[in-house]
Image: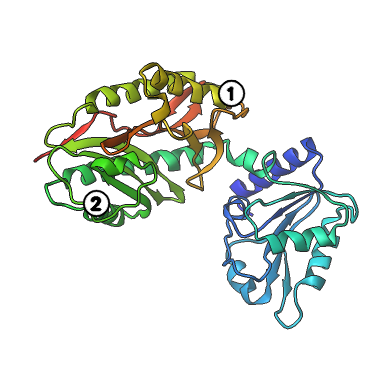
Amino acid sequence: MNPVLSTRMARLRERMAATSTDLVVIGPSSHMLYLADLSPHGDERPVLLMVSQSFAGFLMPALNVDSARQHTDLPFFPWADAEGPDAALEQLLQATGVPRSGASVVLDETMRADFALLVLDALPGAQRRFTGDTVSYLRSRKDEAEYAALKASAVLNDAAMLAGFAALRPGITEREVADVIGQFYKDHGAAREFTSICFGPNGAFPHHHTGDTQLKAGDAVLIDTGARIGGYPSDMTRVGYLGTAPEGFDEIHAVLDRAVEAAIAAAKPGVLAREVDKAARDVITAAGYGPNFLHRTGHGLGIDIHETPYITATSDTVLEEGMVFSIEPGIYLQGRFGLRLEEIVIIRNGVAEILSDLPRTAIAGGA
């Protein structure tokens, strides 16, 4: 096992000891990728990584063993379609050494329900929970290599964003701007994660699906986009307009910029995530737009585009060094436009450091 994965496995076992966990069970997911650099094809055939204090190994369909062996040196307990997984699962559970009754088991919250029930049926009386205080806990605290990968991805995204705004012209469609950004990613060795292009009133839908709306002079433009490079994604939102800004644009843009700054100032080690949400929300509420801020302030970013921590009005998560998350307040005016400004930050050296180098200034396209 490579040094990074060995360190992660050791840290997981430390968390297991601290949380009195006997067994961690992971399905094909980003959790498995994080722990074992393996993300096998997920179908109805059970694939499981099991980790105890003394053992780690895979339940693996026999037809996937040779391919999977290229990515990990952990032992496999293979099973063939003709025989089913039960005998191999029993051998794997025996190898882990966990109590067969009343074990404390952490289940991957993203695994198939039938995989989870297969494990629970084999461990009568198991006390089960999800990965919040074990694998997810570790993933939310990024190391220096992860920081470097996320930074590189963010800087590439800066240039992709500028390419999208540079393409604005009367009559261009949202889909055509998305294609420009997608081609930029491809040309620079990145894989598009998502792109949302919102012209005019479409910006008032926080999760608008990019379509064939054509751009007109005076339309506000919102671009939310991200790509993956080096295994880690980017995510950023910027706003602008074609020609001249619509009425109210500058005021709302200024409110959102202040909200972002307030949230960044609040985001420090030891602060509850809900205090960061409150800092952004208070600015927007004081400006009279509280009801128009329709969602949480942010989400974690790592291997997944959405992961812990979540920056919500109710989150008791305590921010710590290495946590990476978005700060993305928005104000949405139905029938007119919607604006959102998004930064990805990392808690580093006691403050929230922005990963992007692109200013939040509104970007004007030529008419």
Q: Residue furthest left?
A: 367
Q: Quadrant of residue 241?
A: top left
Where, quadrant-wise, is the N terminus in this rendering? bottom right
Residue 220: image quadrant is top left
Residue drawn where x is 67% and y is 52% of the image = 108
Q: Amino acid at mark 2?
A: Glu
* Residue in the image at 30% along x and 41% along y: 203
Residue 349: in sight, yes or no?
no
Residue 56, position as x, y percentages in the image? 74, 56
Q: Amino acid at mark 1?
A: Leu
Please provide percent x and percent y for residue 347: 50, 27
**Location of residue 258 with respect to 333 vertically, above or below:** above
Answer with left or right where residue 325 lies relative to residue 220: right
Element at label 1 = loop
Q: Secondary structure at mark 2?
A: helix
Task: Tell me the quadrant of the picture where the C terminus can be found.
Answer: top left
Question: Up-down: is 115 above or below 221?
Answer: below
Please state if 242 lies on the left or on the right of 53 as rendered. Answer: left
Of mark 2 and mark 1, the one earlier in the sequence is 2
User: Would residue 253 be found to the left or right of residue 68 on screen?
Assistant: left
Q: Would you place residue 349 above or below residue 300 in this image?
A: above
Q: Position of residue 124 (x, y in %)?
A: 88, 57
Q: Which residue is mark 2?
A: 174
Residue 272's disc is 1
Q: CA distance from mark 2 to mark 1?
A: 38 Å
Q: Which of the pair 292/104 is nearer the observer?
A: 292
